Amino acid sequence: MHELIRFVPLMPLLGFLIISFFGRYLKKESVIGAIGSGTIGISFILSLLIFFNLAGSMPEKPLIVQVYQWIAAGKFSINISYQVDQLSILFSLIITGVGFLIHVYSIGYMHGDRSFYRFFAYLNLFIFMMLNLVLASNFLLTFVGWEGVGLCSYLLIGFWYDRKFEGTRITWTGDAANKAFIVNRIGDFGFIIGMFIIYSLFNTLDYQNISETAAAVPAVYFNTGLMTAATLLLFLGCTGKSAQIPLAVWLPDAMAGPTPVSALIHAATMVTSGIFLISRNAVLFSLSPTTMTVIAIVGVATAFLAATIGLVQNDIKKVLAYSTVSQLGFMFVALGVGAYVAGVFHVMTHAFFKGLLFLGSGSVIHGMHDEQNIKKMGGLKKYMPVTYKTFFVGTLAIAGIPLFSGFFSKDEILWMAYSQGSPVLWVIGATAALCTAFYMFRLLNLTFHGEERFDHHKIHPHESPKTMTIPLIVLAVLSALGGFLGIPYALGGVLGNHSNLLETWLEPIFKDAMVIMKRPEMHEVHIIEYVLMAISICIALFGMKLANDWYKGNWDRPRSIVKSNKFVYRMLFNKYKLDEFYFKILVDPLINVSTKFLWKFVDVAIIDGIVNGSAKITMTAGQAVRRIQTGVVQNYAFVMLIGIILILTALIVGI
């Protein structure tokens, strides 16, 4: 059964090729949509079959399916091969399942677009690359998928390349695509150097061989300089793809792309690549406590900063964008304290509720005729009942309201941050969670409740078609119930389920890392866990109530608070001026050096000067010699005579 894995990435590749070559000749959008969605649906079914097969056998070691030998040079060889295990299949189900729903949604959202077929071709190519990233059995194939999703992200963010987009020094959607591409290249440089170091340590790039070698003799590699360097460089790559400090600035501007792109790439799949890479190499990262500490600190700092920025944003998609950055920070906190299962658990629940929220925002934008400013909305609940109900479920989930999916995964991360990390991590994480609950209910109230603040003469809100609302309903169900796959042991008895299904499923993946970190099975329940859980619930409810009090009716209170805290408001609204800071210390100096020194001096003065100067010397010499060519035979004879005399003189003198 596991041999079917080769067809999982093959189907979206086939869809990409068919739509790319024949899409322009297919007259009906429904046919293109069926091809694009159908190929992803088949991949999901195949992944599901492999999942049930694995669930029945639960192999201790991964199954490697070789497609063909890729590179063989001396002692170095690498294969195109896929690793079938609990982690890769879980991510494959998320990618193809949520991806299928987003493809179906896109049929309605992109209806009438002049490049409808091109959009679906890009989506299929992205799914193909993402599946290669998570299914690869070695670093190099993962890196191919890693670069591939970067390329597809560039193509999809800049899909509407002729549209204007407001951002820091960004005017067009193409600028936002360039920003995402360039920032990610910085992280990718760290990835590839880290990969080189790992090869120098293990003489292989195969995940299984590396993990077995490191787990067999952990003392040889534990906390060494090379291991710390390799894992830190890999983490730099993760900060790029997963939008963490210092490479977090690209994701909010990536909202320039169509909303299904935001849901697929920047909520459910690509931005979780960093989480996957660390989880796949949990043994290596567990060998470097320094790197683990850095991951936790960067994660909690990103979670807090992004959550505070989200408090004051007015673009419906940018609120969700900063929310994504913040939630990814939570995942990295979990990984940094060694709670790998909790991190992957939040990847899954986040794919459900954030995919739902982005698609819900797209439904609002679609019904509001491309309006994205939530201050120009209000009262949409009666016009868009399905969108409102599903969006409300997603809001409850991300805010951590019991018993929705986000409650289980977020609370598990906070508990692990406290018990395995530091109380400081818990305090900062809980503060970020408070901000999350507040800005999400602020978004919900300003969009769907209160007075109608849009121009009724120009905008006529309406519910989206079923191709858009059905995926919303499915994701709402998953957002509401998905958390029960990872019920913590502290709630096992209360809810009648003493087993954490997700932890049991992923146990073979992380057992070696747990041994290295000397972590016993954490099935004991502490009273403080219940206390922290109760505080977490109170925080979520308080954030919800505060937002409802401020934004469901009268705006006087938030306006007065803004007026009395203008400095803080401007700092948050301007995103701590991180973009301006990067431009001042990196971009502008680099441009100045490039233009004033490298271009005007090195290129123009030196290189062009040498080339043009040599040509000028040749031309001048030619003009001088040309004067001798008079065409008079007597002159030529005289010159020959002079030459003969000079030669004879030289011979006689003995020169």
Image (cartoon, rainbow, N blue to C red):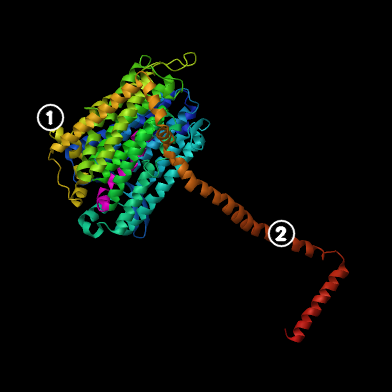
Q: Position of residue 218 (x, y in %)?
A: 22, 56
> Tag 2, which secondary structure?
helix
Q: Which residues are magenta?
A: 266-289
- Give the x, y percent position of residue 186: 42, 47
In which image quadrant can residue 4 be found? Answer: top left
Query: In this view of the protein, can residue 70 be seen by the observer?
Result: yes
Instruction: Report the quarter where the N terminus lies.
Output: top left
For mark 1, give the secondary structure.
helix
Q: Label 2, on which residue?
A: 616
Q: Is residue 143 left or right of residue 544?
A: right
Q: Residues within 10 Å of mark 1 (few under 14, many from 20)?
A: few
Q: Residues within 10 Å of mark 2 (few under 14, many from 20)?
A: few
Q: Given the image, on which type of amino acid does mark 2 rest?
A: Lys
> Of callouts 2 and 1, which one flags the residue occurring earlier in the amino acid sequence?
1
Asked whether 565 or 607 is in front, the reply is 565
Q: Nearer the viewer, mark 2 or mark 1?
A: 1
Can residue 9 be seen here? The reply is no
Instruction: Please state which of residues 297 and 282 is positioned toward the viewer in this rendering.
Output: 297
Q: Going 34% across and 48% down the picture, which residue do you hit? A: 235
Q: On the image, numbered disc 1 is attached to which residue?
A: 494
Residue 220 disc label = none
Q: Amino acid at mark 1?
A: Val
Q: Choose top left, top right, bottom left or bottom right for residue 571.
A: top left
Judge whether residue 331 is colored magenta: no
Q: Main secondary structure of the magenta part?
A: helix
Residue at the farthest front position: 564
How much space separates mark 2 and mark 1, taking CA atoms? 89 Å
Measured from the top left, where is residue 91 in percent x and y? 29, 38
- Residue depicted at x 14% and y 35%: 490
